Image: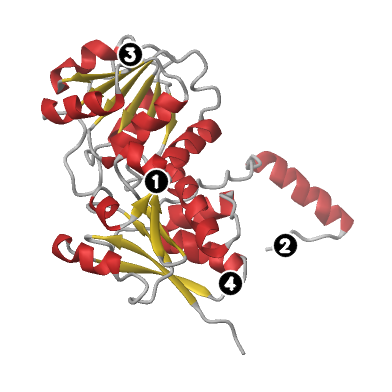
Amino acid sequence: MSEERKAVCIIAWPASHSRSPLIHNYWIKQHKLNAEYRREAVPPDQIKEFVTHLREHGYIGGNVTVPHKETVLAFSEPDERAKAVGAANCLWYEGDKLRSTNTDVEGFLANLDTTTPGWDRGLETAMVLGAGGGARAVIFALIQRNVGRIYVINRTLERAQALQKKFGARVHAAGWDETTGLLGGAGLLVNTTTLGMVGQPPLEINLRCPASLVVADLVYAPLVTPLLAMARERGLRTADGLGMLLHQAVRGFERWFGVKPEVTPELRALVEADLGVRPPAAAAPPQESPKPQAKRARRNKKRGEGLSS
């Protein structure tokens, strides 16, 4: 008797933009599992019904993204990390209990550790743009790495102040107009807003900063956001949102299927291709000048060899 096919999904509104199915179905195929990962576009007024009846909808678990990360806490049993962050992005069952956690924390840290090693060495001040679920995960991660001062910058100052109250004395709320002034003393800048995403306004910022600044962007479409392009032009080290997306997916997959997958260059190339990122063109072989070619032709003619066409 064949094993019952397992199904997992991404719960979002809208859901068409998500690359999570591409990532998880790649791993499912790699590990030869009888499973599939789907998209579920669930509007906010239906999220309670969908999540509380996830098993009845045919799923053993799922991921959660915008705009449901904070909402699902009330419809599941969050672990300590999800409670601390105030947002969940991963659901699974323990018996009949629907549990939730937040894997954005390790996704963010693993991405920086991989792409910009040593980024947290001696890091005293970090700046986080935005005050949503992504910002909460980033702040929690930075506190884990013992960053002493974290500025949360948001256009609505009250939302930044709410995170200051939630996370304690290391977090400081600041207005958008303070960004440039604060950058001079920062070692890390993280964009957690949707600014710079395809279809969204660009992130307008003056990167007047030290050469040691590391810049991370949680946006992955486009892969190289205007912020990252600007940072690279200035020779700054950067971490893109795709790396975080890949690394945050690992723990959920392990929860659902009991197998820990790897983030490989092949997987990253697959998702980059889906995002429309062209691989770097191969360098053309050096061309001989006409004169050496003519000499070689005469030499071959003497030997009775012809040049292949």
Badge 2 marks a residue whose secondary structure is: loop
Q: Which mark is residue 308?
A: 2
Residue nearer the viewer, 169 or 109: 169
Viewer-nearest of discs 4 and 1: 1
Seen at 16% across and 40% down, the residue is 201
Seen at 27% across and 54% down, the residue is 72
Seen at 22% across and 68% down, the residue is 49
Does residue 107 appear left or right of residue 139 in this picture?
A: right
Q: Could you tell me residue 40's position as x and y percent?
A: 29, 68
Amino acid type, mark 3:
Cys
Task: Confirm or deny contact between disc 1 and disc 3 (CB under 8 A).
Answer: no
Task: Confirm or deny contact between disc 4 and disc 1 (CB under 8 A).
Answer: no
> Which numbered disc, 1 or 2, marks the residue that appears first in the sequence?
1
Q: Which residue is mark 3?
A: 209
Task: Judge whether 250 appears above or below 162 on screen.
Answer: below
Q: Could you tell me residue 262's position as x and y percent?
A: 59, 51
Q: Residues within 10 Å of mark 1 (few under 14, many from 20)?
A: many
Q: Which mark is residue 33?
A: 4
Estimate the spatial distance between the alpha carbons at disc 1 and disc 2, rounded to whole Å: 61 Å
Task: Confirm or deny contact between disc 3 and disc 4 (CB under 8 A).
Answer: no
Estimate the spatial distance between the alpha carbons at disc 2 and disc 4, rounded to whole Å: 50 Å
> Which numbered disc, 3 or 2, marks the residue that appears first in the sequence?
3
Badge 1 marks a residue whose secondary structure is: loop
Badge 4 marks a residue whose secondary structure is: loop
> Which numbered disc, 4 or 1, marks the residue that appears first in the sequence?
4
Viewer-nearest of discs 1 and 2: 1
Q: Which mark is residue 102?
A: 1
Amino acid type, mark 2:
Ser
